[in-house]
Amino acid sequence: MLAKDLVRQYGTHDPFRLCEYMDIYVLMSDFKYQKGVFRVINNFPFIFINENLSLETQRIICAHELGHAMLHKDLANQMGGLIETELFAVTNSCEVEANQFAAALLIEDGELLDLLHEGYDLLACAREMSIHMGLLSVRLKDLAEINKDLRPSVYMDARFLGSIGENAGSY
């Protein structure tokens, strides 16, 4: 998967650092409704993030928008940008793919699988890893498609980012 390839190539799960390495400009903006935007301006990729959000929410948004930058740059060019006013409400496959990219980028699969094998449930894994439960659920669903023996007890709807609150990552 592309996100895991980037982690291996650059040695980090940090979406802000990855953007820096790949010359994707990240700017904080004082949005009223939007939480994140990916745009290409004069052939330069930009991610705009609402500066009024918690740092953990900004991190999730950056990872999601980086997913758009890696997977949907041509579409963003055609449309003038990929803008979400509802934080990543899943309305099409592009949003699902960006959520999957963000989950793969931010979650260390080995740690997650170790916790699951130790008997942790989804909520306990999220707490232990300080990861938003919705993001964890997206990753688990993808991992379960690869490994049919993996059967986590709960999956959340892939649209979780559409309603993520300011306490993302905190419990």
Image (cartoon, rainbow, N blue to C red):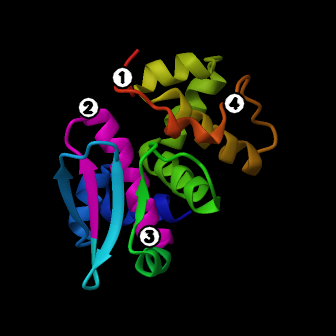
Q: Amino acid at mark 1?
A: Asn
Q: Secondary structure at mark 1?
A: loop
Q: Is 11 rendered above or below residue 81?
A: above
Separation of residues labelled 2 and 4 (CA atoms): 25 Å
The residue that label 4 is drawn on is 155
Q: Secondary structure at mark 2?
A: loop
Front residue (pair 119, 161)? 161
For marks 1 and 2 on the same chain, the one whose residue lies earlier in the sequence: 2
Residue 27 sits in which quadrant?
bottom left
Single out the mark in the foreground, 3 or 1.
1
Classed neighbour count for the residue bearing mark 1: other residues with Cα under 10 Å, few (<14), some (14–19), many (≥20): few
Instruction: Determine the main secondary structure of the stretch shown in magenta.
Output: helix
Instruction: Determine whether label 1 and label 4 are within 8 Å by CB.
Output: no
Front residue (pair 151, 25)? 25
* Residue 89, disc: none
Q: Amino acid at mark 2?
A: Ser
Classed neighbour count for the residue bearing mark 2: other residues with Cα under 10 Å, few (<14), some (14–19), many (≥20): some
Separation of residues labelled 4 and 3 (CA atoms): 26 Å
Single out the mark in the foreground, 2 or 4.
2
The residue that label 3 is drawn on is 70
Q: Position of residue 89 (x, y in %)?
A: 54, 45
Q: Is 132 rendered above or below residue 147?
A: above
Classed neighbour count for the residue bearing mark 3: other residues with Cα under 10 Å, few (<14), some (14–19), many (≥20): few
* Residue 54, disc: 2
The residue that label 1 is drawn on is 167
Q: Is 63 rendered above or below residue 152?
A: below
Which residue occupies 33% across, 69% down?
A: 39
Instruction: Determine whether label 1 and label 2 are within 8 Å by CB.
Output: yes
